[in-house]
Image: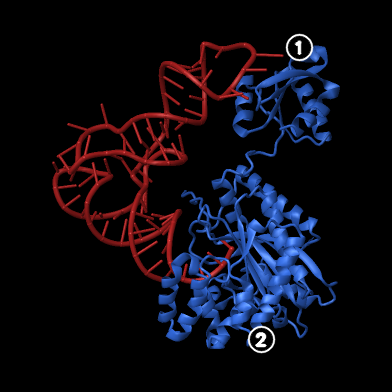
Amino acid sequence: MNKIKPQIPKGFRDFLPPQKVTRQHVIDTIRNVFELFGFEPLETPALEYASILEGKYGEEGEKLIYKFDDRGGRKVALRYDLTIPLSRVIAMYPALLKPFKCYQISPVWRADKPQKGRFREFWQCDADIVGSESMFADAEVITTIYHILKALNFKQFKIKINNRKLLNGIAQSLGFQVEKISSLLRIIDKLEKKGIEGIKDEMLKQGFQKENIDNILELFNITSGNTVDLLDLKNRFSDSVLVPEGIQELEELFSHLSSMDVDSNCYCFDLSLARGLDYYTGPIFETTVDEPKIGSISGGGRYDNLIGMFSDTDFPATGSSFGLERIITVMEELNIAPSHTTTTEVLMTLFSPDMHKDSLRVASLLRSSGIKTEVYFKHNKLKKQLTYASNKGIPFVIIEGPDEKKDNNVILRNMIKGIQKAVAFDDLAFTIKQELSEL
RNA sequence: GUGAGUGUAGCUCAGUUGGUUAGAGCGCUGGGUUGUGGUCCCGGAGGUCGCGGGUUCGAAUCCCGUCACUCACCCCA
């Protein structure tokens, strides 16, 4: 009989225990910071009606939505991100207390072609604030990003900040057609990658007028020292309505960030940051690292009109999204990922057939004290049992033989330090907990 | 959707202008050490050379097809 070939779909992955332990650690850290800032957990289904997702991500994004017909012929789709499902939730439960602050850490699916840092099933960690127009909300979202990266031991990162009102205002003042602005922004977003000349070519190719192009690129030339003076922009576009509004928001936002003790080396204004999604309406932000080259590790912004697509009542909202696997990729390449590969804390060895009962009793005692304990199942020589613990990365091994039994103690071996000592049976759980805390 | 590269042992890879029995390191396994892992020494197992076809006396090596993976572009986390 032919065996079924074991395989999984392209762009989908298994996470074996050592990898899953790392992922869990990162997720726990992110969740803790979210909750520290008063965000509450939320979970939405993997599957949504296709109509909920369609028409939200632009032409390119639309192609990447996984869509199916269910058995009743209804069009359904796997969620593409966590922001649209959240918007649906807000529209469905209008009585939710506002401001509504929630987070969701869940997989999303995109029928993309996989490459470095890109998968078809990947996890996003979103935190959103719905129902507040205040820049306090945006500042809090950014501060949360900052604290998460700090908690994960990131040293070098930059949260780039810009504002859609500012960008739209500039583009309109310079004579760009309103309906072409989103494609303009998408080109501007490539500035860092392609350079001034590169995006100029792209704009010409897309049929923008040469005069308009020169005008907008002049801004980037002047400010290529990468700090743009907001005052200078305000003066240049004093006739615009949107530009001063955008700048006002940015000034408030930066002031709040400063009050919230966010290190000013970790964020900056970046006029070329545009973000691909169409639905942003105010501040936008994105986190990047210089090394490794992996694109952004978090992105977000204010989307005041999105919830209105599902409801007559509109709600202002702002939020951000972390890419879990990108964060982990960066941590691994920078060697700041946690080193433990198992959650098990103790291996209880089996010494000899007549000692089985005693060994099981020790394991039972440890477990009732909350110590994660594995019992070796076979009466192999100790060498093998120790090798097993070592290879698996279990930090402690307990040995109980006839000698120990006679003295009413056990041997506690620290596999990391390579030292061991006799510990009285009654002190065992306490001693292990103490040593675990010192690892 | 477009383009490029790579498929040889569990893993990372070597393999000469096509030549007889396909190698190394790591890992695994047994022993040196029947109460102790990570070092050292000795032994052992393990390969349809991705798959299918073609060229040839002979193919891991050349050609065609196919599948898988990786990377880049597009777009994005």
**With respect to residue B17, does A96 lie above or below?**
below
Q: Chain of mark 1?
A: A
Can residue A70 be seen at all in this image of the molecule?
no
Residue type, label 1: Asp
The quarter holding residue B15 reads: top left
Q: Which chain is red?
A: B
The x and y percentages for residue A203 are: 44, 79
Are the residues under badges 1 and 2 in a single subunit? yes
Report the disc number at residue A241. Answer: 2
Depth order, front residue of A64/A292 = A292
Q: Chain of mark 2?
A: A
Label 1 element class: helix
Of labels 1 and 2, the one closer to you: 2
The quarter holding residue A335 reads: top right
Q: Nearer the N terminus, badge 1 or badge 2?
A: 2
Q: CA distance from mark 1 to mark 2?
A: 86 Å
Question: Pointer 2: residues within 10 angstroms few (<14), some, or many (20+)?
Answer: some
Depth order, front residue of A30/A359 = A30
Please name the residue that numbered disc 1 is placed on. Answer: A403
Residue type, label 2: Val
Q: What count of labels does the image hold?
A: 2
The structure residue drawn at horizontal position 79% and vertical position 66%, both measured from the top left corner, is A101
The x and y percentages for residue A83 are: 68, 70
The x and y percentages for residue A356 are: 75, 22
Chain A colour is: blue
The structure residue drawn at horizontal position 62% and vertical position 80%, both measured from the top left corner, is A235
